[in-house]
Amino acid sequence: MRRLYSLLFYFVIPFVILRLWWRSLKNLAYRQRWLERFGIYSQTYSQNVIWFHAVSVGECEALFPLIFLIQTRQPNHPILITTTTPTGSARVKTVLGESVQHVYLPYDLPNVIARFLKTFKPKIAVIVETEIWANLYHACAVEKIPLYLINARLSEKSVRGYQKIPSLVIPALNAITICATQTENDKTRFISIGANPNTVQNLGNIKFDVTVSDAVFSEGRALKNTLFAQRFILLAASTHDGEEALLLACYAKLKLKIPELLLAIAPRHPERFATVETLAKNAGFNIITRTSQKFCDNETDVFLIDTLGELKLFYAAADIAFVGGSFVPIGGHNVLEPAAVGVPVLFGLEMRNFAQIAEKMLLEQAAIQCKNTTELETAVIKLYTQPELRRNFITRAKNFIVQNQGATERIYNLLNL
C-alpha cells in the first residue's frame, strides 16, 4: 500500500507545486525555498539533531515552551525545527532566531525523505499534534530513529478517514515509539485506528503551558493608552473568510450602544490582510492598519492587525477577545492564549479542534460560546456593562489553565534526552 501511495504522491507533485505558485500570488513566501521541500539544501547543517516538526503557527506556539526547556537544560544539543507553512517558518525565526536550525518539512516521498535524513541525521524525531506520513515514519523505523508523536489529537472525522486505509496507517503507527495524546479521548481514538495500546499515553495538552512575559502586559497597556486612545477594544483574532463580514455587521450594531467600541481584527492568514481591509472600507468603516503606524482616534472604527507574531500583545491591549475559526467550519483556534493573557474569551460553535478545552472552559464559566452574532452582541454588551463580570471570567480562565499545566515537563521526561 505504501508503494501505491508513493506512486500517487509522485503523480500529484506537479499539482502541489502549482498550488504553491497559486498561493504565492497573494503571499510571495510560498514561492521561496521550494528546494527545501525536496530535501535539497544550499548550506551545511549540524547533524545528530533533535528534530521537531510543527506544521504552522499554532503548533509552533505550543512547541516553544518545550524548546526553551530543552535549551535551558541541554544547551549543547543542536535542534532542528521543520514547518510546513511560511507563517510557521516566520514565527520560528522570530522567536528562536539562530538558536535552532530551521527548514521546511520535505514532501513524503522516499528519495526526498532519504536526503532529508542524510542531511540532518536526527537522533530523535518529534512530531507535534497529528502528522502521520507513511514514508517518513517508515524511514525513521528503518534508520532506527526514535519517533514521538506529542500533543497528539485526533477528531472523530479523522478517525473515520484513517480507518478506511488501515494498510497504510497501521504500519506508520507501528513506527511510533510513543504517542503522547492531549486527552483520554484522543488516546482511545489513536488505538481505534491501529496504534499499539502499549505505546499510547495521555500526557495532557502542552498548550496549557503557554507563557506570557511581563513585557507583553506592559506593552499591551501602553498600546491601550496610546495606539487605541483608551477605546474599549473587541479583538477578533485568527479570523477566516466569511467571519469578518459577520463581525463588521455585528460591530455596526454594537457601536450604536457602545460608542467607544473599536473592532480590532487579526486575520489568520497574511494573504487575506488586503482583502479584509477592502471589506471594511467597502462597508463604510474608517480603518487603520498596524503597518500604517497611525494612531486610532474617536473616528476610527476598525484596526487591522496586518502583522505576524503580535497577537499576545494585542490580547493584552484588548477588553474582550473573540477567537475566530469558530463562526465558520474551520474547527476553532487556541482559546488558551487569550485566557492566559487575561482577557474574557468568546468563541462560536465550530470548535472541534479544541472541543474538550471549550467544553471544560464553559463548565468552569471561564468563556462564553456564541451561536451567532446576535449572541455575540449580547455577550459583548453584558461584559461591557459589568466590569466585575469581566474580571470573574479572567480569574476563572487563569485558574483553569493553572490546574491543567505540566504537560511540557512530562513530555520532556518522556523524550529522555
Image (tube, rainbow, N blue to C red):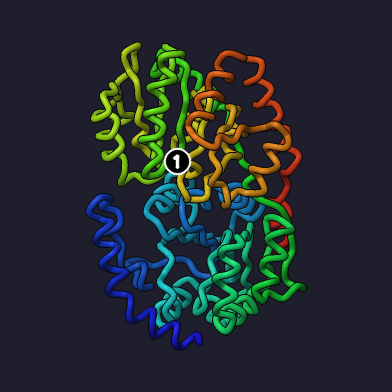
Task: Locate the C terminus by quadrant.
Answer: bottom right
Secondary-structure class at tag 1: strand
Neighbourhood count class around disc 1 (C-alpha, 10 Å): few under 14, some 14–19, many 20 upward: many
Query: Nearest the camera: 231 or 283?
Result: 283
Relative side of 6 to 218, left or right = left
Q: Residue at x 60, y 68 (%)?
A: 159
Locate residue 91, reporting x and y percent: 44, 47
Relative side of 401 to 35, left or right = right
Locate residue 377, reporting x and y percent: 50, 25
Q: Decide if residue 140 is in sight here.
A: no
Q: Decide if residue 335 is in sight here.
A: yes
Query: Nearest the camera: 248 or 131?
Result: 248
Q: Residue at x 51, y 58 (%)?
A: 54
Relative vertical location of residue 169 with respect to residue 215 in this rendering, above or below: below
Relative vertical location of residue 95 with respect to residue 75 in this rendering, above or below: above
Q: Residue at x 59, y 36 (%)?
A: 369
Query: Nearest the camera: 114 or 347?
Result: 347
Q: Amino acid at mark 1?
A: Ser
Locate residue 101, reporting x and y percent: 46, 59
Locate residue 415, reporting x and y percent: 68, 63
* Image-quadrant location for residue 402: top right
Q: Which residue is mark 1?
A: 238
Q: Residue at x 45, y 46 (%)?
A: 328
Relative vertical location of residue 209 with respect to residue 417 in this rendering, above or below: above
**Total numbered circles:** 1
